[in-house]
Image (tube, rainbow, N blue to C red):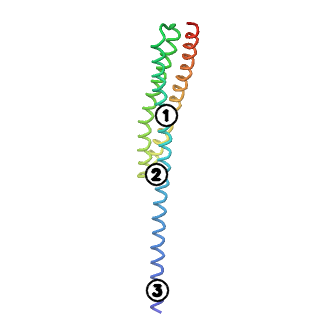
Amino acid sequence: MGKKKQQKKIEIAEQRRQSEIKTEVFIQQKAAYYAALVDGFSTSRRDIDLNIMTISGGGIGLLITLLVTQGQLASQVLAVGIAAILLFVVSILHVMRVMKLDSKYMLLLCKQEDEDTEEVRCDIKRMDEKLKQHDRFVLVWFLSGIALSLFFAIFRAVGFIHN
């Protein structure tokens, strides 16, 4: 009878150990999933911001080239070109701001893993709203710069045809 009791204790201990291993594996899998999710989110957001920044920089270069070539410009055409450059500069500055806020957002997400308090959740929510707002600003400035660049290009083309 003692041997069966000893065997039963060994089986229970083994089941507990297996359960602890499964729990530990589950926790590790959950952490890996969360890390991959955050990494994918931040990478896609960063890629969009970097593309906007690159295209804005190219737009500035193109507009400067068009401004300094082909002689005299009407003041309205010059104003449109300068406004487009300024919009691209503003979008680049906002992208830089978004990247700074994005790093603070990632730190808050890490802080939430350590201490999941109401204050941290509110900070994350506020930061998320702030990031969305700045993303909208970047998109508005960028698309406005593209629109003014198109107007500028059309004005330059018409001026080139008339000369």
- How far is disc 3 from disc 1 in space, using C-alphas? 65 Å
Camera-side residue of 65 and 134: 65
- The first of marks 3 and 1 along the sequence is 3
- Residue 62 percent across, percent down from the top left: 48, 21
Q: Is residue 31 above or below residue 39?
A: below
Residue at 55% of width from left, 17% of height from top? Answer: 153
Residue at x 48% of width, y 81% of height? 11
Given this view, does label 2 or label 1 mark the residue nearer the observer? 1
User: Against 160, is 1 above or below?
Assistant: below
Residue 45 x/y as whole percent: 50, 39
Q: Mark 2 Cα within 10 Å, few/some/many (few <14, many 20+)?
A: few
Give the camera-side residue of 141 and 7: 141
Dot 3 corresponds to which residue? Answer: 7
Check disc 2 and report the residue beneath it.
35
Q: Earlier in the sequence, mark 2 or mark 3?
A: 3
Q: Which label sits on residue 104?
A: none
Q: Indicate which disc residue 51 carries.
A: 1
Q: Amino acid at mark 1?
A: Asn
- Tell me which numbered mark, 2 or 1, is placed earlier along the sequence: 2
Q: CA distance from mark 2 to mark 1?
A: 24 Å
Horizontal and vertical percent position of residue 145: 52, 22
For residue 152, which quarter of the picture? top right
Does residue 110 sit above or below 76 in this rendering? below
